Image (cartoon, rainbow, N blue to C red):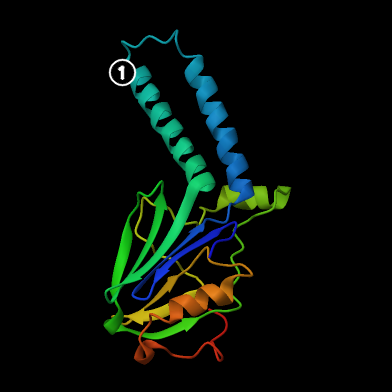
Amino acid sequence: MTSSRYKIEQTPSKITLSAKIIRNRLKLLLTCRDLVIVLLILANISNLNFESTFNIILLIFLGLLSCQCIYDLLWQLFGQEYIHVQNGILSHQFALFGLGKGKKFSLVEISQWQPHENYANTKNTKITLRNYLSQRRNTSTISSPLRQPNSKQGAWSFVYHGKTIYIGEFFYSDDYQAINSKLNNLIPKKAKKGTLSEPEHGL
């Protein structure tokens, strides 16, 4: 089963779900703007005296800043979230071109598994002046491959070693019920808090 944002690979003993991130249009615009500014500065510093320690430090800083902007741009365009279940292990990962950190959970140690059928990711921010000013004040909460998954919301949640874990930050579409059904089939019954017909709502 596939859609414009989702891909499911499944056998009787395993399942791999992948979803493209929901792009933050405002952050994408700001990242492009910052990258253009940095590249214009780099293109016009050929006359700097590189015998000066300050100029060398400035060049290194601008180089690192441009790398960060490129990374942010690629993440917004090509970032993905993966959920994989096989051999009693649930893996959750954010990745860019297949590379990224992840977490693994033993299915026999999870409890209170529940789908959030009404979950809605709102990261696709509209480009407005109000949102622009808000975006500049606050750090984006969108996860990235450079850090361990630590979502505060998601399409599914469960308790693991006394801590509530959320996964499926970018799994939200009309395909939700079909995706949920396939994933739910590999979750132990004793781990579930509700059933598909009676899911818990809200986060």
Q: Is residue 43 left or right of residue 132?
A: left
Q: Is residue 3 left or right of residue 59?
A: right
Q: Residues within 10 Å of mark 1 (few under 14, many from 20)?
A: few
In the depicted structure, whether residue 144 falls above or below residue 49: below
In the depicted structure, whether residue 50 falls above or below residue 180: above
Q: Residue at x 38, y 60 (%)?
A: 93
User: How many numbered marks, from 0 up?
Assistant: 1
Q: Residue at x 54, y 45 (%)?
A: 77
Q: Residue furthest front?
A: 12
**Residue 33 occupies quadrant:** top right
Amino acid type of the residue tagged 1 in the rendering: Thr
Whole-percent x, y for residue 14 in the image = 35, 71
Whole-percent x, y for residue 71 in the image = 44, 40
- Camera-nearest residue between 158 and 36: 158
Q: Residue at x 42, y 10 (%)?
A: 48
- Camera-nearest residue between 161 and 188: 188
**Residue 106 occupies quadrant:** bottom left
Q: Residue at x 65, y 48 (%)?
A: 133
Helix, strand or loop for disc 1 = helix
**Residue 117 occupies quadrant:** bottom right
Check disc 1 and report the residue beneath it.
53
Q: Is residue 166 left or right of residue 178?
A: left
